[in-house]
Image (tube, grey):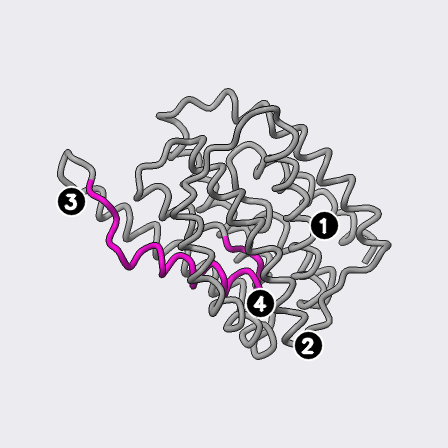
Amino acid sequence: MEALAIAAGIAVVAGAALQSATGFGFALTSAPLLFAAAEPERAVGLLIVLGLEVNLLTLGTEGRRPEPLAGDAITILAYGIPGLFAGVLALRALGSTALQVAVTIGVLATLAVRALARRRATPRPAEPPRWMAPAAGFTSGALTTSTNTSGPPIVLYALARGATPVQTRDTLTVTFIGFGALGAAALALGGADWVPSAEALAVLVPAVVLGHLAGRPVFARLAEDRYEPVLTAVLVLTALAGLATALF
């Protein structure tokens, strides 16, 4: 168990660095080991609290004016509210392995659909369909309270929207903060025993700060034409790693 706790701490540092560098990936990287080290409800609670920390660091400590797609973020959060309660039901009904497998399948299937759509696309980029923002919001809300891996639907929506790297990163950050606060409320209202222990927070809160500081300069070096391939690669690798951790 001690080795597992150390591995979970390393995963938290790596996840915070990845999220600082790309705008998402904290939960995808750290969730598998946190779910292995703690009960599912407590693991989700840890991911919510630590996720709020890394996102507040992104918005509040970089000395710049954030550039989120405000209207899109509001729409995603609004449609995410019913998804939050659906996620609470899924958390109680399913085990962590089933939840991680479902997340992995969803991520890979969505990426496959997007790759096929890009091959058939016309040279002029089209606006995403109207249903896409509500669907991303509901799905992200459900993932927030079931596995806390709410990033992929928002990433895919931002890519379809044609957002710049800065807009994508800041939109992710704003929606993650909103979903973190709403998710904690939904878990509390649902009677979930989600509050993390003080001992875990004492170790993992500084780990998030360390990871955030390590990942910050990486984002500044990512050229715009490399940002989307990096996001896609991170989605695939973390989804597969989470699946491997869940199954083996």
Dot placed on the residue nearer the N-terminal end, 4 or 3: 4
User: In the rendered structure, which amino acid carries the disc numbered 3?
Assistant: Arg
Kindly give the residue lying farthest to the bottom in the view shown. Answer: 93
Quarter that holds the C terminus: bottom right
User: What is the distance, in whole Å, between disc 2 and disc 1 at their CAs?
Assistant: 26 Å
Mark 2 crowdedness (10 Å alpha carbons): few <14, some 14-19, many ≥20: few
- SS class, disc 2: loop
Tell whether label 1 touches label 2 (CB within 8 Å): no
Residue 216 location in percent, x, y? Answer: 60, 27
- SS class, disc 3: helix
- Where does label 2 land, which residue? 191
Residue 120 is marked as 3
- SS class, disc 4: helix
Q: Which residues are magenta?
A: 126-150
- Front residue of 94/130: it is 130
Mark 1 crowdedness (10 Å alpha carbons): few <14, some 14-19, many ≥20: many
Residue 37 location in percent, x, y? Answer: 73, 60
Q: In the figure, 163 relative to 200: above or below?
A: above
Mark 2 vs mark 4, foreground winner is 2
Dot placed on the residue nearer the N-terminal end, 1 or 3: 1
Dot placed on the residue nearer the N-terminal end, 1 or 4: 1
Mark 4 vs mark 3, foreground winner is 3
- Where does label 4 land, which residue? 97
Q: Quadrant of residue 61?
A: top right
Q: Quadrant of residue 184?
A: bottom right
Tell whether label 3 touches label 1 (CB within 8 Å): no
Dot placed on the residue nearer the N-terminal end, 2 or 1: 1
Residue 8 is marked as 1
Quarter that holds the N terminus: bottom right
Magenta span contains residue 145: yes
User: In the rendered structure, which amino acid carries the disc numbered 4?
Assistant: Thr
